[in-house]
Amino acid sequence: MCGIVGYTGHVQAAPVLMDGLERLEYRGYDSAGICVSDGDAAHPLKALRVKGRLSALREASENGKAVPGLSGIGHTRWATHGEPTVENAHPHLSGGKVAVVHNGIIENYAELRVKLQGRGYVFESETDTETIAHLLHYYDHGDPVDAIVRTVMHLKGSFALGILFEERPGEVYGIRRDSPLIAATSPEGSFIASDVPAILPWTRNVAYLENMEIVRLSPEGITFFNLDGEPIEKEFTTVSWDVEAAEKGGYAHFMLKEIHEQPKAMEDTIRPHIRDGRIVMDELGMSDDEIRGIRHIQMAACGSAWHVCMTAKYIMERMARIPVDVDLASEFRYRDPVLEEGTMLMVVSQSGETADSLAALRYGKQQGMLSLAIVNVVGSSIAREADRVFYTAAGPEIAVATTKAYSTQLAACVMLALHFGRIRGVVDDDTYAAHVEALLKMPEQIREILRGEARMQWLAGKYANTRDAFFIGRGLDYASVLEGALKLKEISYIHAEAYAAGELKHGTISLIEKGSMVLAVATQKDLMEKEVSNMVEVRARGGTLLALTMEGNYDMEDQADFTIYVPRTEDVLYPNLVVVPLQLLAYYVSLSRGIDVDKPRNLAKSVTVE
Ligand code: G6P
């Protein structure tokens, strides 16, 4: 997500920090800032922050000359709490005594904020990070390691931190939990960074911090501490990656990196919304009466986000008993839709800038509809214009073919459906509790699927030369195959069609011949028998049949030529699991065919024209 750089040494810090941040630009950001210590323990720390590009930071700091000093921290921010503004940009300060940069999400920040306000702290931003700055200030009694330990004990969620203390000029501190942080040494000084590319011009000698390890950079060198404040030894390794490989975290492509980021993206999207077994949607700002008043949901989106809507329709109708219609955003406003009172418009968009989705939102608002957007980019046009916003926490997505944004959008829809269903009194307590538990298990289940990656790679190699592929499924599995087929065709250029399995015999089955690849997704218990009959029909026409089903459903092997399994979960959560092997299949087929996976021909990541 965001980028962190920290430095201390014997060259000017500001240019080093800005250069490091520029090397993390590929991660995406919307604002940036630095804080440099001038070396005088009596001078309050000051931050320089800008909205927009790093070039603006270079300008504001006169290329670093305006902020002299030999140690400092810097940050590029990808907004999660609060819009991309100067006030919300990092570093965040507390009383000029502590400055902090943060990657990750503090789940209990609202609670901490109230407590800190009670102790007299005044907040200048809407961020979760500012709570960390004030906590550090509160616990700082001259021992930085102790202040850090006491602070992190209060934090729920994920963090990588870079910290300066006014009274410790020349020192930079760092700590992490579930967000990466490295430390590095060079003859010019020492560094912390969220990612390897930031430090590559200076050194290849890095140490990877483990969860809850603390690092102190000082002119004398690097020291690591455990949570008891005791110094610990850490091994340094030599990075052999070139800059390009380093940007991709060692993965061959951004798409593969983003596929592997899904467990974390899911955790970051789900966990902040679950407290004590309950789904909490405070940030949505929808009152219970407003939720009870919804009589109909109209969804609109483009591309994969439209597939999310197709999935959400099944889930919302089942869990919340609200009728849902789904339109392609480019069609919605031109069909003169009948929008009765009590209709809520839901727009799903990773970028929040897709022209048709934005136009659909504006059209719905003109018609007087309440609007709710599921968006990944904070402060984007759709996020700003929708009445209610649910932010997914996928972080910046760089590959054109969406993966982690799609998964987090699905998770958002499940949580909204359960939340609405509970408030409307249509989900019983046991079902609700079982689904909340299953949601919390999903990140680990996705990790488990990713451990089986080699099998998908092998399978992709076998079918890389297929001319036609058919993806079939019933119910929610139909919604999943829409995405599976799109993933394959957009990055492998293989003709692929998604069909509701029961509809196959009304036409497309005539296309199936020896050598056609048919992938059947079968996870819905109530539809299993019917789906198996459809699979048998395909096999009888000579198609090669691949089945994607859940563990334990081993009878499937009697029907299919090859079977892929995902862990068991609740019916409505399978789309979130089956999509992972489908993404891997598409990725490895594309790779075998020598296609530029991250930038397939004719496609753009964000389509801002109609
Ligand atoms: C483009 C991308 C798709 C994406 C669609 C909608 O076509 O290639 O991956 O699903 O736009 O984008 P959005 O940003 O609105 O989710």
Image (cartoon, rainbow, N blue to C red):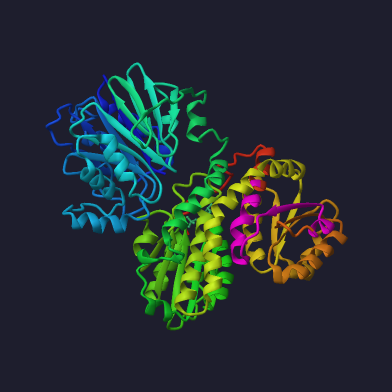
Q: Is any atom of residue 16 visible in this view? A: no
Figure quadrant of residue 471: bottom right
Q: Is residue 56 left or right of residue 204?
A: left
Foreground of the two, 141 or 116: 141
Question: Which residue lies most toward the left here?
Answer: 42
The residue range painted magenta reads 555-584
- Magenta-drawn stretch, dominant element (helix, strand or loop): helix
Q: Residue at x 50, y 56 (%)?
A: 408
Question: Which residue lies most toward the bottom here?
Answer: 341
Query: Can residue 458 be found in the magenta stretch?
Result: no
- Residue 237, image x, y percentages: 48, 23
Foreground of the two, 295 or 57: 295
- Residue 263, image x, y percentages: 53, 49
Figure quadrant of residue 205: top left
Q: Is residue 353 left or right of residue 136?
A: right
Q: Residue at x 23, y 24 (%)?
A: 70
Q: Residue at x 46, y 56 (%)?
A: 269
Q: Is any atom of residue 343 visible in this view? A: yes
Foreground of the two, 413 or 134: 134
- Residue 586, image x, y percentages: 65, 47
Count the marks. 0
Above or below residue 268? Residue 472 is below
Q: Residue at x 35, y 36 (%)?
A: 228
- Residue 577, image x, y percentages: 61, 56
Foreground of the two, 151 or 243: 151
Q: Is residue 558 left or right of residue 53?
A: right
Above or below residue 412? Residue 184 is above
Q: Quadrant of the N terminus?
A: top left
Query: Can residue 556 be found in the magenta stretch?
Result: yes
Q: Is residue 2 left or right of residue 427?
A: left
